[in-house]
Amino acid sequence: MDHQKKPSYRLKLITNGLSVIFLISFQACNNDYCSCVAPPISSTLMGEWEWIKTVTPSRTITPLQSGYAKSVKFLNDGSVNYITFHQADSLTLTLVQNRNVVSEDKEAKTVTMDFGLDGVIKFNLSGDQVEFGDLMKVYSAKSDTVRHHYKRKVH
């Protein structure tokens, strides 16, 4: 009978040990210094977005008013992130992200992406919508007056 208790004691010891390791690793991933809980905001942008409107200092333009649809796709080909801009199903622009220069503010849910010599764009994420300004050589909040609003495309 003593022989039968030892395997069950060992099994309990192993189970308890694994439980403690799991709890410690779970706690470690919930602190502010660990990035393993939530992916970077920029990865949240991945996918296709449909144009809702563009707001300028003087007017608001919608797909209905303009007569065409627009979309933006945030993609990754395994080596780089890039963004494609489409108007009326035609590709109008492709920007390749400079991976070394990305500024993310998780609290404000903003991402400023650098596209090398093409310039920078600041993206603001809010739920299933993203808002951003025009491509600028150097980002300036004062010059960032045009806002393009998109919603995540549901397939």
Image (spheres, grey):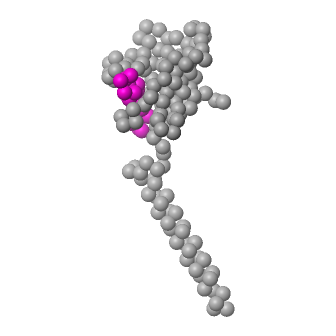
Of 96 and 40, nearer the camera is: 96
Q: Which quarter of the rendered picture does the C terminus lie within?
A: top right
The one nearer the camera, 43 or 131, is: 43
Q: Residue at x 36, y 37 (%)?
A: 100
Q: In the rendered image, is residue 127 in sight? A: no
Side of 16 relative to 146 (left or right): right
Can you say whether 103 is above or below 145 in the image?
below
Q: Is residue 37 above or below residue 129?
A: below
Would residue 36 be counted in the magenta stretch? no
Residue at the (60%, 85%) spot, across then down: 6
Q: Is residue 112 magenta?
A: yes
Magenta part of the chain: 104-122
Q: Is residue 23 visible?
A: yes
| Callout count | 0
Q: Quadrant of residue 96?
A: top left
Q: Residue at x 48, y 45 (%)?
A: 38
Residue drawn at x 42%, y 18% is: 134
Spot occupied by residue 95 in the image (x, y as percentages of width and height): 45, 25
Percent across and percent down for residue 117 are 35, 24
Residue 70, quarter of the rendered image? top right
Residue 51 image point, x, y percent? 55, 20
Q: Position of residue 99 (x, y in %)?
A: 40, 36
Question: In the image, is 134 to the left or to the right of 78?
Answer: left
76 and 155: which one is in front?
76
